[in-house]
Amino acid sequence: MKKGIILTAVMISMLIYLLPSCYKNKEDILALPIVSFRGEVVPIVVSGGCGCHNNGVAKNAVQFSHDDTIYYDVILARDSILNAMATVGRHPGGGEIYFKPNEKDIVSRWYAEGSNDDGGGCTVTGTVTYTNDIYPIYTTTCKGGSCHGGIAKELDYNYMVANVAKLSSMVNTGGQTHPGGPMSMSTCTIKTFEAWIAQGQPK
């Protein structure tokens, strides 16, 4: 009888100890993996049906890549358009262009998770200048007929310096306070602009 009571007490104690840890393990197992922007989303838009947007195939289409250089900011800035293509199936430029079912799932999940850029390995060193570092980002990401230099104001050096407060706010929020509407910025672009502003915006 005494032996049975002791055994029961030991078993109850073990259950009390194990149940919380089992529950936590269950949460870990059930957690869905985060979609990788660089590993899953980018390959979708730099190949396949998005061919016109790569390597200068169509001059009137915004370019996602050219000569093996991927314009991550261009893709990030169009996260809502990509999501619309995935959920509604409407390509802004017209034509019969659709994502495959698995591509729709990847893009819509990535958008729902916040359109995050997981390419955080960029390191910015040395002097960052407008000519060598900022202007190339501007020409590939911000410039175009429907963007800056077109219907929106040209962002030259003097304008960026005069509006450093707006620029800082946009960089600090990852593009969410962009005056023309929220946009996403890659981690490398954010770090480059942060360094340029911190160094006094050298030309």
Image (cartoon, helix red, strand yellow):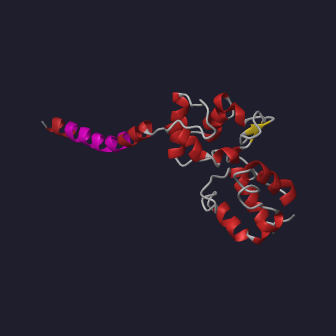
**On the rendered structure, is 86 left or right of 12?**
right
Please tell me whether residue 166 belongs to the stretch shown in magenta.
no
Image-quadrant location for residue 134: bottom right
Q: Is residue 129 visible?
A: no
Percent coordinates x, y for residue 45 in the rendering: 65, 35
Q: Residue at x 71, y 57 (%)?
A: 151
**On the rendered structure, is 139 left or right of 167?**
right
Percent coordinates x, y for residue 29 in the rendering: 43, 36
The quadrant of the picture occupied by the C terminus is: bottom right
**On the rendered structure, is 203 left or right of 178?**
right
Q: As rendered, which of 154 and 66 lies closer to the eye?
A: 154
Please tell me whether residue 15 belongs to the stretch shown in magenta.
yes
Q: As rendered, which of 198 and 137 lies closer to the eye?
A: 137
Q: Main secondary structure of the magenta part?
A: helix
Residues in magenta, as a range: 7-22
Q: Residue at x 39, y 43 (%)?
A: 24
Q: Residue at x 79, y 69 (%)?
A: 161
Residue 76, compared with residue 58, is above or below; it is below
Percent coordinates x, y for residue 22 in the rendering: 36, 39
The quadrant of the picture occupied by the N terminus is: top left
Residue 145, compared with residue 203, is above or below; it is above
Q: Which residue lies furthest to the left in this view?
A: 1
